[in-house]
Amino acid sequence: MAEEITSELGLYRSRGYKDYSLGHQKMYTGPVELLTNEKQRFRVLDVGTGIGFGLRRMVDANVLESYVGIEANRETFDYVSGLPWPAHVKIHFGSWLDLPDDALEPADYGFCIEVIEHIEEPLVAPFLAKLRRNVKRNLFLSTPDIRETTHGTATADEWRVRIKAAGFSEVAIVGSQWTTLFVCE
């Protein structure tokens, strides 16, 4: 029996360090284009930095005033934090919920791409509430719809209700395939 690959780094390695999920990467592409079009730099929070696909796009687009990333998988954290990043990029190891709010300055934009479906159900509401407290403008959150894949944990409509309950005033759904991108204000 093949070993189950449970981390983004494991998936990346299994594909010979070639892009493994263009759909996952697309969840960063549109939002980074929006940031680029504003022609200024922003404070960005990325919960679930992974191997740095989104971070690389933001660095290359020169949209970062500062970047705080959180990565909960040790092996993936070691990989991404070992890459050469500008000084204004900080990546923390651990759980988003364990990082004290006072260790963060509010971000203009937040990203939470393909992470929340891995959060235990009782922690989803506090996870989203903490994102609301730490993101001033928009949160870009993507997660699979349970109707499209067994990897999902709720429908897009159920996620929309949860996101609004956390205090985001507007939640737009941008496209949907096996995963949905929510743009939250």
Image: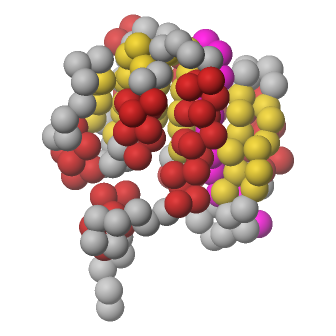
Q: Is residue 121 above or below residue 179?
A: above
Most common SS among magenta residues: strand
Q: Nearer the viewer, residue 26 or 115?
A: 26
Q: Is residue 113 magenta?
A: no
Residue at left offset 29%, top offset 30%: 91
Residue at left offset 30%, top offset 24%: 89
59 left or right of 161?
Answer: left
What x and y, as percent, mark residue 130? 55, 22
Q: Is residue 79 above or below residue 7?
A: above
How many labels sit on residues?
A: 0
What x and y, as percent, mark residue 124? 60, 39
33 left or right of 51?
Answer: right
Q: State which region is magenta.
A: 136-147
Q: Is residue 143 magenta?
A: yes
Q: Quadrant of the C terminus?
A: top right
Q: Residue placed farthest to the bottom in the image?
A: 1
Q: Quadrant of residue 62?
A: top left
